[in-house]
Amino acid sequence: MRLVASFRLLGADWPQRSSHMLGVLAPSHGLVFGGELEPRRPVAPASYAYPLLPGMPRRGKNELPSTGDVPAGRVGAGEEAGWYKVQYREARAVWEYIKDSKGDAPVGRSYCTGTVLGDTIYVHAGCLLSGRLSDLYAYDIPSQTWSRLADAPGEPRGGTALIAAKAVIDVSEKDVLLRWGGFAGHELGEDNALDVYTPSSNTWRTFHPQGPEGKPGPRSVHGFAPLAITSPPGDTERAVALMWMGERDPATNGHAGVSLFWDDAWTLLQVPVSDPSDASGGFIWRPLAINRSSIPEARGWFPVVDVPTGPSERATLARILMHGGLLSSNQRSGEAWLLEVRRDT
């Protein structure tokens, strides 16, 4: 299956920042919170809503009134102990500190990653004041209960990416979490390790995808998103995920310096394999063909989120919103881009 992609600039005047949080409301608006303009200095804890659809009116500076237990400003998400939830209603951001949760909750951290699968929120890895983590926690929303799960393989890391997707593991399709890359004092990914967590068995497996047309280089703080585009009749390849950009060469003086970033994009596909012990797991990397007439500057430290598509489009189209990030000029971007991925007909 061949996929093609294009970027569309939604706006260059969204809040400038990196290492922040991004969400989608309805699918009419993109939501922005937290992050930094200067290294390790959190911006004010304000929420912003920006229209995603053409022709929608904008309201002033697009800042939403915040009420409730508004958290302090933060960088890299979750760096303080304690967890919050936010609801957006009547053009307000209503915050609530989660104080009644049960179970084994994760310690506070920064530059962690997380994803949602069904009624469960997963939190993984990240950085402490000293050292990095490889743990995985699940928060069951209905019961408000935390559980510590199996630690991930490989080096403890920050700046990795974890997504929820569907893949064939041991000959049957399963809901899984996929992890790739990160930073452990050096960029991870040289070994082409795709780590796959299966919630139903609480186990990790590491695969090494094939790369007949090349493989992505080591990276962290990159874009990683699931793809649910279906295969055309007779095609055995299935789309699993998309990965793009990210840090390729960290600054010598850490967060205060200038890093180099990738400007590439890759699709992760999967084909059936007869041998469950196949080291590739049937996964394949393939460069993504992107229309280069309009494309973001290479960057890292940016959040991404799926934008829902209509029922008639779902089988052939995926939309992903990305905002902000750190550029090689050491400036934080205020651009919002919509990445559209289509099945090539």
Image: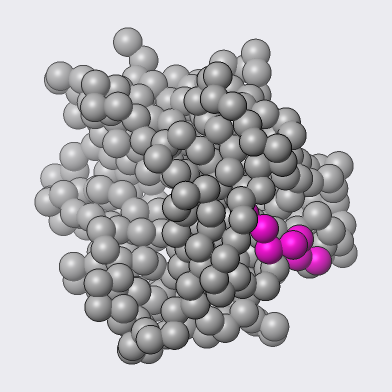
On the image, which quarter does residue 262 sit in? top right
Q: Find the residue positioned furthest to the front.
A: 90
Quadrant including the N terminus: top left
Name above or below for residue 100 compared with residue 285.
below
Which residue is drawn at the image coordinates 86% and 42% (left, top)?
Answer: 329
Name above or below for residue 208 compared with residue 212.
below
Which residue is drawn at the image coordinates 62% and 56% (left, top)?
Answer: 65
| Residue 6: percent from left, percent from top | 53, 21
Name above or below for residue 64 compared with residue 321.
below
Q: How is the image coloured?
A: one colour
Q: Is residue 192 visible?
A: no
| Residue 145: percent from left, percent from top | 31, 81
| Residue 115: percent from left, percent from top | 41, 59
Query: The magenta stretch spans which residues?
Result: 41-47
Query: Would you say residue 25 sits in the magenta stretch?
Result: no
Q: Is residue 95 visible?
A: yes
Q: Is residue 275 left or right of residue 252?
A: left
Query: Would you say residue 42 sits in the magenta stretch?
Result: yes
Q: Name the foreground residue: 9 vs 244.
A: 9
